[in-house]
Image (tube, rainbow, N blue to C red):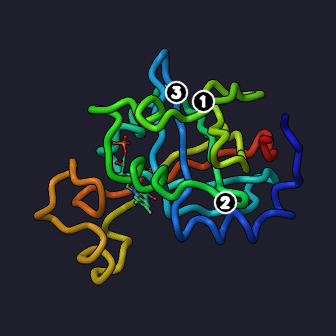
Amino acid sequence: MRQKIQVFDHAKEILGALGKGVLLTAKSGERVNMMTIGWGTLGIEWGEPIFVAYVREGRFTRELLDESMEFTVNIPYGEYDRRIVGFCGSKTGREVDKAKELSLTLVESEFVKAPAVKELPLTLECRVLYRRLQDKNQIPPSIRESMYPEHVDSSHPMANRDYHVEYYGKILSAYILS
Ligand SMILES: Cc1cc2nc3c(=O)[nH]c(=O)nc-3n(C[C@H](O)[C@H](O)[C@H](O)COP(=O)(O)O)c2cc1C
């Protein structure tokens, strides 16, 4: 069941959960993959409710995002299994089918191809209106050094040399699954 919500009424839960990690799921063709994200911005732009996700260039998820230009965000609401965000934040969809490994319950979305993940029931369905690769020259040197270490290869699951692509997703629907 989907209990529709006003997304900004739940800003505290959404932004509060980001610190521990939430899931971003993308689907292209038959390929579905979810990754943990810890950064995100909730707000308004062009008069629309927007969630901005920041995905490093080399992530597998980024390929699916670029192909589909849609995503879902799944946020814990109440108790949940922390291993899900740990696994999805350390394994790559290039090598494992994360949904299968974790036996996740994928629920068809209302408006986008990417499914929702019932185990983290607060769901945002988003369509990318705009994407932008961050300009490294505009990032303060201290942040460049700590967040984008040149000597760390793109395949590293945490901080590496890749900069982030910003995906501005218009929030088409927000709900809690039960
Ligand atoms: C708590 C946490 C937060 C993370 N936040 C982000 C993020 O905001 N952006 C990003 O590109 N990677 C982030 N990562 C790393 C990705 O989740 C990780 O590299 C993942 O394996 C990528 O999966 P993929 O290769 O299937 O796309 C985070 C990892 C953890 C554990």
Mark whose residue sits in front, 3 or 2: 2
Rounded to the nearest whole Å, what is the CA distance between mark 3 and mark 2? 26 Å
Q: Residue at x 67, y 40 (%)?
A: 118
Label drawn at residue 27: 3
Residue beneath the point at 11% across and 64% down: 151
Of the two numbered discs 1 and 3 on the same chain, state the one appearing first in sequence: 3
Query: For the point 21% across and 48% down, which residue is it?
Result: 155
For the residue with label 2, is its CB less than 8 Å from the closest atom of ligand 1? Answer: no
Residue 114's label in the rendered image is 1
The amino acid type of the residue labelled 3 equals: Lys
- Whether residue 121 sits left or right of residue 67 in the image: it is right
Task: State the image coordinates of residue 44 (x, y, percent, origin top left).
Answer: 76, 59
Residue 109 vertical placement versus 170 (above, below)? above
- Disc 2 target residue: 79
168 on left or right of 1: left
Q: Secondary structure at mark 3?
A: strand
Q: Amino acid at mark 1?
A: Ala
Residue 65 shows in the view: no
Counting other residues with Cα less than 10 Å from the Cα at mark 1, is it few (<14), some (14-19), or many (20 or more)? many
Measure the C-alpha gap from mark 1 to mark 2.
24 Å
Q: Marks 1 and 3, how far apart in space?
A: 5 Å
Q: Nearer the viewer, residue 85 or 149?
A: 85
Among the 4 quarters of the image, the one containing residue 148: bottom left
Image marks 1 and 3: residues in contact by CB distance under 8 Å = yes
Residue 24's image quarter? top right
Residue most extreme to the left: 151
Q: Mark 1 CB in 8 Å range of ligand 1?
A: no
Badge 2 marks a residue whose secondary structure is loop
